[in-house]
Image: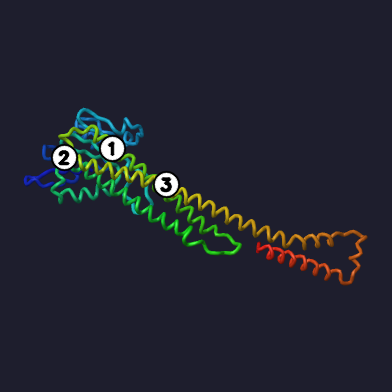
Amino acid sequence: MITMYRLDENGKAAALANAGPGIEIDSRTFWLDSLNPGADELERLRGIMGIDIPDKQDMAEIELSNRLYKDGDALIMIASLIPKSAGRMPPPHPATFIFTKDLLLTVRFCEFFSFERMAAETPRDPQIASASAVFFRLLEEMVSDRADGLESSMRRLEELTARLFMEPLPDRGLTSNSEELAAVLRGIGDLGVEVSIIRESIASLQRVLNFARAHLPDDRKGGMTGVMDSLKNDLTALSDEAAFFMSKLSFNLDATLGLINIDETRVIRLLSIVTLVLSPPLLIAGIYGMNFQNMPELAWDWGYFAALALMALASIAGVWHLRRRKWL
């Protein structure tokens, strides 16, 4: 599906959705947005733009030379963005920006929140009336999304930190807290995946912005130098924040693994105590369970009760020793 944005006779931006094969591009058209284009749509767009447009396979290339390059007067930039999702954060998907003198073409194969907001704002905001305005406003929306994602992840990390240190795990005596610790460990793992996705997208946007700053002529920047400087500062700050987040996440991971080791030690301690308490009775039972003929105790009338009493006394002595040493 191709959506065309152009200025009407009154100079106001209007959107034409599902632009068909008879689409006409003139000087008033400033943005073409192609969502899930097929081979025929890509071929039409190649004819409109006069350049080779990357398809879905080309957009998946990771080499920098295949993601940021010039084709004549056109700048082709492929950024890794986070798709629209109501649940767990999906992996990044590429989106292509082709910037010519008066026209911006965006090609994408999934939906993004930033594009949805731009589609709603463009007809209402008179300042969005050129290719450069759309391009840099899209970058601002994407940076805002990455900032919101980091803020959400940071709040979740603070909850996990409080769960580990400020709200101690319930005291279960000698029993295990494995379920609580496993839940915290899964939460840390989920956050690590999310922030890795956000960092990848931030790095991609930084490369796109730096490429545009370096290769866009002044007449095509549309007076957006201040916006580019602001975007650069915001992306640098977000990159630093993401790096700090990962270091804090690593600290929480180390702390969780340490608590898991303590929890395992508690279980081993319980087994050791049971072994210490039961070993003397088992030794006594093993001795008097032997079937040798020359065992005087076998003839005792009260031998059975004496053996039981000796076993109980040995167990009580073991428990008393553990309590005296404060191991129990």
Mark 1 surroundings: few (<14), some (14-19) or many (≥20) residues within 10 A: many
Looking at the image, residue 28 sits to the left or right of residue 54; the answer is left
**Residue 78: x percent and y percent?**
29, 37
Looking at the image, residue 122 sits to the left or right of residue 264; the answer is left
Looking at the image, residue 91 sits to the left or right of residue 271; the answer is left
The numbered mark at residue 290 is none
| Gap in angstroms between the C-alphas marked 2 and 3 | 36 Å
Most foreground residue, 146 or 88: 146
The numbered mark at residue 208 is 1
The numbered mark at residue 223 is 2
**Residue 118: x percent and y percent?**
21, 48
Identify the element where label 3 is drawn: helix
Q: Which of the two discs, 1 and 3, labels the residue nearer the N terminus?
A: 1
Looking at the image, residue 257 sits to the left or right of residue 92; the answer is right
| Gap in angstroms between the C-alphas marked 2 and 1 | 18 Å
Q: Residue at x 21, y 38 (%)?
A: 105
**Residue 195: x percent and y percent?**
39, 47
Q: Residue at x 21, y 33 (%)?
A: 216
Q: Are marks 2 and 1 in contact (CB under 8 Å)?
A: no
**Residue 286: x percent and y percent?**
81, 59
